[in-house]
Image (spheres, rainbow, N blue to C red):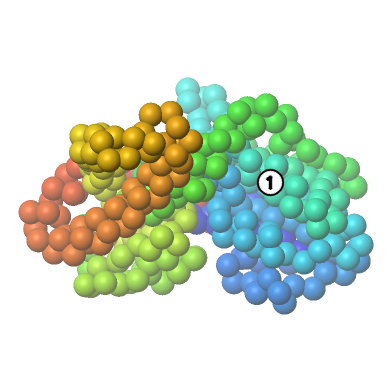
């Protein structure tokens, strides 16, 4: 039996998991496909002949923390069970050409964790479905989405057939060099970047407090504060809320998200560091203490400032002038900035 677990924001990884599950059932093999956010990992029981699979999006060239936590807590293999990993990543289609995304450490880290738990990793496959990171770029046109989906469904089913035939498919290792080169970005996103993204979402005046985003959040990162959704640091930036809001009210506050770190850096350079050089010169220059300050304490302090200023912004959005300024400095406000919804499979 195959036990396949997935995490999905807008539906890409869910659809991949369902394609694989369907391939198993077409061969009259039993398959259970489950949303890992709805599974108590300690209740999972594996038989000696069971196979396990994991499907997840790629966030910041890594697996989302919710997927990583699930993998770390996953039970050990009872009998060197076969395992595979698929990650959806930012596929694009330009002038008819299909352009792949990058996995970073998403596949490698998952494989290492599974092997450390005694599994035989027989499948590592990235699937280049459409990117849904609407904070960074507009959603793809419908014709491009359809073309990418048609191609990726065939790729996924071929991958499943190889595994069903008892073969291996380690296609992810073809990208090993470039994935290792961008590994530092993966670490930076995990430590800092994901929190920056989490504190960049706001609800515009078009929000009617319907609660769809709060109820639909797969990691319970949203709550209603002052009759407006508020994003906590637990946000995975899976983009479900922004892409599924019926009023198109959820925006990425680009102006705010850029202004806070810029002003923070200016303040440090103009006031804090000059004063520090006078009273504690050992914390400046190229000393070890200065390195700690620059690479550890400064990012941590910036996150504290970001969290505090985000809460202030949330309350200030009640004022029309503030709300309009934030919305007008958001790229997601423009009509050409398309939202993304994965086709249902």
Percent coordinates x, y for residue 21 in the rendering:
72, 58
* Residue for point 23% across, 72% down: 227
* Residue for point 62% across, 56% down: 68
Res. 128 image quadrant? top right
In the depicted view, which residue is nearer to us: 169 or 221?
A: 221
Residue 35 horizontal side relative to residue 242, left or right: right
Percent coordinates x, y for residue 175 in the rendering:
68, 30
Quadrant containing the C terminus in the rendered view:
bottom right
In the rendered image of this protein, does residue 78 appear above or below residue 152? Answer: below
Quadrant containing the N terminus in the rendered view:
bottom right
Query: Is residue 206 visible in the rendered structure shown here?
Result: no
Residue 73 horizontal side relative to residue 303, left or right: right
**Residue designated by label 1:** 109
Query: Is residue 76 visible in the rendered structure shown here?
Result: yes
**Which secondary structure lies at badge 1?**
helix
* Residue for point 59% across, 71% down: 38
In the rendered image of this protein, does residue 294 appear above or below residue 344? Answer: above
Percent coordinates x, y for residue 320 in the rendering:
9, 58
In the rendered image of this protein, does residue 210 appear above or below residue 193? Answer: below
Pointer 1 local density, CA inside 10 Å: few below 14, some 14–19, many at least 20: some
* Residue for point 58% across, 45% down: 62
In the depicted view, which residue is nearer to us: 69 or 228?
A: 69
């Amino acid at each position: 039996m195959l036990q396949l677990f997935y995490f999905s924001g807008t539906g890409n990884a869910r659809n991949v998991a369902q394609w694989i599950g369907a391939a198993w059932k077409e061969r009259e093999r039993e398959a259970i496909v489950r949303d890992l956010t709805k599974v108590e990992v300690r209740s999972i029981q594996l038989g000696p002949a069971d196979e396990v699979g994991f499907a997840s999006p790629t966030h910041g060239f890594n697996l989302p923390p919710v997927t990583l936590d699930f993998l770390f807590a996953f039970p050990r293999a009872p009998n060197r069970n076969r395992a595979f990993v698929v990650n959806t990543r930012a596929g694009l289609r330009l002038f008819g050409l299909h352009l792949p995304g990058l996995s970073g450490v998403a596949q490698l880290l998952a494989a290492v964790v599974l092997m450390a738990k005694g599994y035989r990793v027989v499948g590592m496959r990235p699937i280049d479905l459409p990117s849904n990171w609407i904070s960074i770029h507009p959603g793809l046109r419908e014709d491009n989405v359809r073309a990418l989906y048609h191609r990726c469904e065939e790729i996924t089913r071929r991958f499943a057939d190889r595994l069903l035939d008892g073969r291996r498919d380690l296609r992810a290792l073809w990208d090993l060099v470039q994935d290792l080169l961008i590994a530092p970005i993966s670490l930076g996103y995990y430590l800092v970047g994901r929190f920056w993204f989490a504190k960049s979402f706001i609800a515009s005046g078009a929000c009617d407090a319907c609660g769809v985003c709060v109820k639909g959040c797969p990691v319970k990162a949203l709550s209603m504060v002052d009759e407006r959704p508020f994003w906590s640091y637990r946000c995975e930036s899976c983009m479900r809320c922004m892409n599924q809001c019926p009023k198109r009210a959820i925006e990425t506050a680009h102006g705010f998200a850029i202004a806070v770190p810029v002003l923070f850096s200016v303040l440090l350079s103009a006031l804090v560091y000059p004063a520090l050089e006078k009273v504690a010169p050992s914390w400046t220059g190229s000393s070890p203490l200065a390195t700690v300050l620059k690479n550890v304490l400064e990012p941590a302090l910036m996150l504290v400032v970001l969290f505090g200023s985000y809460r202030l912004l949330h309350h200030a959005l009640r004022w029309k002038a503030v709300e309009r300024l934030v919305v007008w400095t958001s790229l997601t406000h423009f009509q050409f900035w398309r939202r993304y919804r994965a086709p249902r499979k």
